[in-house]
């Protein structure tokens, strides 16, 4: 069950995320669920697999905005790193474990909500 | 709560253009308490919404990276789009490097992702909406709503600021005016007139862009332009004319320009604008000159005009105006018979001496003072006619001029009737001359006024026929008792066959309308013979006598009585 407490334990900056939602817990949790279902996670995975640097950048950039607004720090930080790695690149570069981290952190949260 | 407060507090609409649902919903949630919020998923959807005009949008919050149409493309299109370009845009971005380009394309501010706290976002949105609304109000106040050029007072203010900040440069003040604009407005309608003014303003805007100047619509069809000294004024006028000439009917309009070159700091800006306007006015109706520069001669003429205007009341009180009489003779009998006289005013000024009627009559016609002078002449002429009737027992008419301005006076008929009865005259004795050009403006009102005078029993002569722009059709509509052919025709009657034929045709036409003709300006035997031959009924001019004072006219009466035996 996803709650403010579980998010705090997970490592989210709940104070900041809630603040953006005018301290409405219900709305914040609704937005977090919406953020976790963002199709850009899937787009990121497939574009990295296909070594499409431009598409990967676009997906990561989109996630940076929304995940950042939700203050989901464990996902946000690797997303930011990935965006900077891919910025302006036409060819895929070595992104190390960043994509796996992003996807697994997202998975962790999804499981919390299960 | 006062009206301003109600308007301030009414909910504005904010359009959020963002493809990311979380960001979109979050911003909407923050703003919803204070604004109506609508959404678009990309730039194209935003444009469709804004063009639909279903909403009056006060603010656009714009993401940059979006599918279909990104934020940068939207900014470019918005800058060119009349319906969008005045709406303030705040860009939503997580990238600093986009900032400069977005600012250059017209964005007013940024909201960074992740977003600031809601209070900060709300404060930014509110501040920018207020700022832009205030800016729009100021823009409306300082601009003419039709042409979007500055209005007169802001033009003067900004001209002064421009000159103060550019002290090493010198400037010219131009006035641009349209001849017969009011008539064109009447004939072709208000929409046509507005179209002309907008086209003219577009032409002026081009000039301003090329010459780093500013301009305004000062009044009706009068525009002022301030540009750096040295531009070719004729070329400027030609450029403006070129714009106007392209439109339908617009070739009938004549645009003229007055200028005050190298304006100084001795007077307020408005003074120089008026000087340029005076120069422009000085060539009204003068088709030889299209550009007139204000100079010392014009300045002196203006000073003289002011003097004449200031002195008119004293002149009436002190009887400085003298009524002269020019005889009119019926010429179709065995010998010319004195039948009438035209009363003409002369001004003997105690300091200036003889003031030419050409110097004060057009001036007073323009500012309305002519009614005072006319009134004086009517009374003097009627009084004199009364004296002659008693003294000589002769059946004689005197015609007096009725200016266009007089015809607007609703009590004109009563006034003239009183003058007639106070002097024991009949309506037939005092004939009214109304100039042809009076009919060509405000035709309906003129017709009504002239009809009222005729209904009261007065006889109307149409003066100066053929000197202006009257249509022949108007002759059929005009209630007149005599047609007075302009002296310009007489000048041509001897030298040109066509001139002769024209007078003949006018006389035939008048005869067909059952209206007698009077020809003025007949100066010599040859002209006299010819006008008599074409069938003119009455002749006035130096051939018989120049205008003379009452004593001089009495001699003509006595001569006439002698001839009658």
Image (spheres, rainbow, N blue to C red):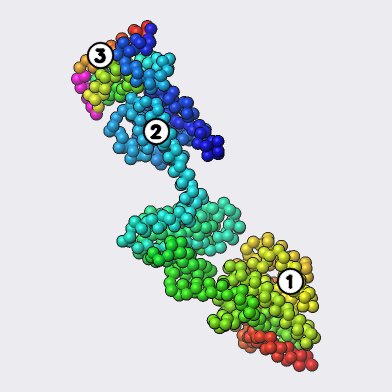
Q: Nearer the viewer, residue B497 or A98?
A: A98
User: Neighbour class for label 1 at 10 Å: few (<14), some, many (≥20)?
Assistant: many
Residue B159 in view (yes/no): yes
| Residue hosting label 1 | B416
Q: Residue at x 37, y 62 (%)?
A: B171
Viewer-closest of B329 and A3: A3
Q: Subunit of mark 2?
A: B
Disc 3 crowd rating (10 Å Cα; few below 14, some 14-19, many 20+) is few
Residue at mark 2 shares a chain with residue at mark 3: no
Q: Residue at x 20, y 22 (%)?
A: A93
* Pointer 1 or 2: first along the chain: 2
Residue at 69%, 84% (x, y): give it. B327
Q: Nearer the viewer, mark 1 or mark 2?
A: 2
x and y percentages locating residue A26 in the rendered image: 43, 15
Q: What residue do we see at 58% from left, 60% from top? A: B182
Q: Please, what secondary structure does the residue beneath circle 2 have?
A: helix
Q: Give how far across and how far down residue B376 sits, in percent.
A: 67, 75
Q: CA distance from mark 2 to mark 3?
A: 38 Å
Report how far apart the C-alphas of labels 1 and 2 lie in the structure. Answer: 72 Å
Task: For the residues labelled 2 and 3, say whether their Cβ atoms are less than 8 Å apart.
Answer: no
Q: Could you tell me which secondary element the residue under label 3 belongs to?
A: helix
Chain letter of disc 1 in the image: B
Q: Which residues are magenta?
A: A88-95
Task: State how far apart marks 3 and 1 are (Cα).
Answer: 106 Å
Q: Main secondary structure of the magenta part?
A: loop
Q: Is residue B168 above or below residue B86?
A: below
Residue B4 is situated, as x and y percent measured from the top left of the image, at 52, 39
Is-magenta flag for residue B160?
no
Q: Which mark is residue B124?
A: 2
Residue highlighted by disc 3: A100
Element at label 1:
helix
Asked whether residue B69 appears in the rendered view, the answer is: no
């Amino acid at each position: 069950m996803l709650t403010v407490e579980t998010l705090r334990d997970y490592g989210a900056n709940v104070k900041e995320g809630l603040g953006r939602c005018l301290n409405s817990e219900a709305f914040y949790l609704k937005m977090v669920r919406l953020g976790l279902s963002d199709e850009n996670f899937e787009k990121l995975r497939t574009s990295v697999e296909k070594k499409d640097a431009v598409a990967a950048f676009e997906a990561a950039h989109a996630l940076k905005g929304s995940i950042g607004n939700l203050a989901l720090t464990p996902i946000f930080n690797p997303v930011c790193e990935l965006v900077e790695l891919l910025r302006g690149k036409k060819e895929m570069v070595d992104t190390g474990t960043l994509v796996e981290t992003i996807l697994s952190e997202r998975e962790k949260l999804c499981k919390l909500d299960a | 709560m006062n009206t301003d407060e109600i308007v301030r507090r009414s909910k504005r609409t904010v359009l959020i253009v963002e493809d990311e649902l979380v960001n979109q919903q979050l911003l909407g949630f923050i703003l919803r308490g204070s604004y109506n919020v609508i959404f678009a998923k990309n730039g194209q959807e935003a444009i469709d919404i804004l063009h639909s005009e279903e909403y009056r949008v006060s603010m656009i919050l714009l993401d940059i990276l979006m599918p279909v149409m990104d934020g940068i493309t939207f900014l470019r299109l918005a800058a060119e789009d009349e319906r969008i370009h005045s709406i303030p845009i705040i860009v939503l971005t997580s990238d600093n490097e986009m900032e400069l380009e977005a600012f250059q394309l017209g964005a007013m501010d940024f909201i960074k992702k992740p977003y600031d706290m809601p209070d900060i976002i709300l404060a930014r949105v509110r501040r920018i909406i207020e700022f832009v609304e205030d800016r729009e109000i100021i823009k409306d106040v300082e601009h003419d709503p039709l042409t979007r050029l500055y209005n007169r007072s802001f033009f003067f203010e900004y001209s002064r600021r421009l000159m103060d900040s550019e002290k090493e440069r010198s400037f010219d003040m131009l006035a641009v005016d349209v001849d017969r604009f009011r008539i064109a407005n009447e004939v072709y309608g208000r929409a046509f007139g507005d179209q002309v003014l907008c086209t003219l303003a577009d032409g002026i805007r081009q000039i301003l862009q090329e010459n780093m100047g500013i301009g305004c619509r000062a009044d009706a069809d009068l525009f002022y332009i301030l540009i750096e000294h040295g531009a070719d004024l004729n070329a400027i006028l030609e450029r403006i004319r070129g714009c106007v000439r392209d439109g339908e009917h617009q070739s009938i309009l004549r645009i003229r320009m007055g200028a005050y070159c190298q304006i100084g700091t001795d007077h307020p800006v408005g003074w120089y604008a008026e000087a340029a306007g005076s120069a422009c006015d000085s060539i009204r109706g003068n088709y030889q000159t299209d550009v007139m520069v204000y100079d010392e001669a014009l300045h002196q003429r203006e000073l003289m005009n002011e003097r004449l205007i200031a002195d008119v009341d004293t002149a009436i009180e002190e009887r400085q105006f003298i009524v002269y009489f020019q005889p009119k003779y019926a010429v179709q009998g065995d010998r010319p018979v004195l039948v009438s006289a035209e009363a003409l005013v002369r001004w003997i000024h105690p300091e200036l001496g003889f003031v030419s009627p050409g110097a004060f009559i057009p001036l007073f016609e323009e500012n309305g003072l002519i009614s005072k002078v006319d009134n004086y002449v009517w009374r003097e002429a009627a009084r004199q006619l009364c004296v002659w009737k008693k003294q000589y027992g002769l059946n004689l008419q005197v015609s007096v001029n009725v200016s266009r301005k007089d015809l607007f006076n609703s009590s004109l008929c009563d006034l003239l009737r009183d003058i007639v009865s106070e002097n024991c005259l009949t309506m037939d004795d005092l004939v009214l001359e109304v100039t042809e050009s009076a009919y060509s403006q405000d035709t309906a009102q003129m017709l009504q006024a002239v009809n009222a005078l005729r209904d009261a029993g007065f006889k109307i002569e149409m003066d100066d026929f053929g000197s202006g722009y009257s249509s022949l059709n108007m002759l059929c509509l005009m209630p007149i008792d005599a047609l007075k052919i302009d002296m310009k025709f007489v000048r041509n009657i001897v030298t040109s066959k066509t001139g002769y034929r024209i007078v003949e045709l006018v006389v035939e036409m008048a005869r067909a309308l059952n209206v007698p003709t009077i020809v003025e300006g007949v100066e010599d035997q040859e002209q006299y013979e010819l006008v008599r031959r074409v069938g003119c009924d009455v002749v006035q001019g130096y051939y018989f006598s120049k205008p003379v004072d009452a004593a001089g006219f009495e001699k003509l009466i006595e001569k006439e009585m002698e001839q009658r035996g």
